[in-house]
Amino acid sequence: MLLSSYGCGNCPHHLERLIPNQFSSGPFVLFPSNKTIQSQADEFLFHCGIVEKAETLRGWLAEDLVSARLENLTQTQPSGIKHILVLKATDPSLYAEIVARAQRKWLTDVSRDMDRAWEEGLERRHMSILPELTRRVDVFQNWGIRYTTTTEIDRYFDEWGQLYLRRMWSHDLIGPEEKLGGNQFNEYLGVLAAISGRCQKHLCFTGLLRHKHPHLDWRNLLTTFAPFDEFLVSLARHLDADRLQLQQILSSLTLEPSNKDAHLQAAETAWAPIVRSNQNNFILPAYGLEINPFLFLLRDLQNKYPQDWFEIANNREKRWRRELNDVFLRPRWTCAEAGIPLRDERRVMTDIDALVYDHEKNEIGLFQLKWQQPVGPHGRGSRSAAKNLVVESNKWITQVSAWLSKYGTAPLLERLGASPTTSPHVILFVLGRYNAQFAGKRVVDQTAVWADWAHFIRAVAETTRSSLSDIEMRLRSEAARIRADFQGESYVVPLDDMAVIFNPSQEPEQSPSE
């Protein structure tokens, strides 16, 4: 394969070199960033991005989702480019995941609307304390930042941290009272909210200082550090928490030698809220808290506490079924309180995770509920999630359809205590918690409706007195519209003496090749 020779792999593998295998000791070396260091960092990050793009394109090529054409130039370009690899999207499923992303944005908008009064109140409080905030921030050694705070200021920014985290997806993978490592997930969220609030405070002070001193370099202001013991004691006092318990919880929010393999050798990038640079110090990057810190936390908890994670995973279906049943209220709807095994003679063919009957429209919905690990678009994690979902769900659809052909809906209605005079209309739903539509050549059995959970509840909420047929129609048509409206993307990736051009907007009339 053309890209294989370039050693494509995910960006986290390249970041391993920045995290030591064991802690060193000694003071934190604090120095200002300069143009030379910034240029080196920019170059490193740029090449990480190139490798990540190359990994994505290689995966698409392997699955025959894009076409490839290699052009060998008659003359080497001033940039050193000798070859052009033109890749074009050829499969309509390539950007199917845009459907789930649209629904996550909708959920974020719903959260923002629900919290609007809270946010407006915080903005009014901000204006009242702005003069004090401005007085408290100053320049450190002519290039850095320093500021002082109060309990009132810290509590204020705690609320901003909570508000911001509420708008991010995937934190519902674990229930608030479920335990990992002896701590409730709520306790992890409380610590995360506190350090998110600290980040919001730091960003605020950074903006105020930069406004007063425009010559200061953003890179010297945004990322800071804190002595390990000082940070731990201060946070424990702020949260009124036990220090040992807090240290344990913080370890699942921190990238350090003990967990770097779990995060940096994974198929998906998850940015760390905190980085432990040596035995005595934390680095506090703003970026890790801006780009969904739940992804890092969840992966770390799964790696550290596999038995707890396994037990929680076994209970997820019950929690999701309760959420689904809460959408369909009596007396119009009747819902099964537990999953229903479908038996043929004495053999269990498959089961139904959730069952809903609409007395008004005489329709019955059979649901498969597929919890998923949160993954980003296009990567190896996404391809693995797609394979698992499609293969297992197609099998489920086939088995349920066969069972219904043999036994009909009467046994299911009996379980619900319903006895309609005519046979109900049956609709199958495959619901992925975070995504139900992926790029790939695998044939999806369209006998069922495939949707992510956010899309499903949106369809229910926005369809007046919705029936299951109405929900089905909306889910199918809206997913098709979102995919059709998406314009795709076009970009160039330089790889040594080759330029990889993806979806060129135009091409020369004559081939530049030999």
Image (spheres, rainbow, N blue to C red):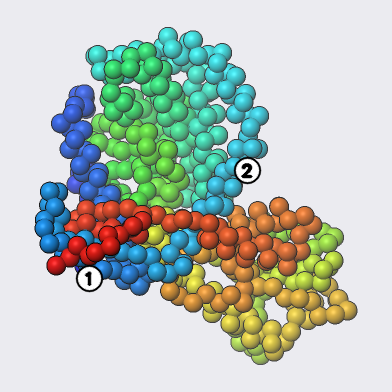
Residue type highlighted by circle 2:
Val
The picture places residue 449, in percent across and down from the top left corner, at 62, 69
Residue type highlighted by circle 1:
Met
User: In the image shown, does 73 or 511 lie closer to the viewer?
Assistant: 511
User: In the image shown, does 240 or 387 lie closer to the viewer?
Assistant: 387
Q: Which mark is residue 110?
A: 2
The picture places residue 14, in percent across and down from the top left corner, at 22, 50
The picture places residue 461, in percent across and down from the top left corner, at 71, 52
In this orientation, does residue 497 appear? no
**Local SS, label 1:** loop
Give the residue pinned by disc 1.
Answer: 1
In the rendered image, the vertical position of residue 126 relative to residue 28, given as above or below = above
In the picture, measured across the screen, residue 98 lies left or right of residue 122, that is left
Q: Check the picture and name the quadrant holding the N terminus.
A: bottom left
Q: Quadrant of residue 112?
A: top right
In this orientation, does residue 487 appear? yes
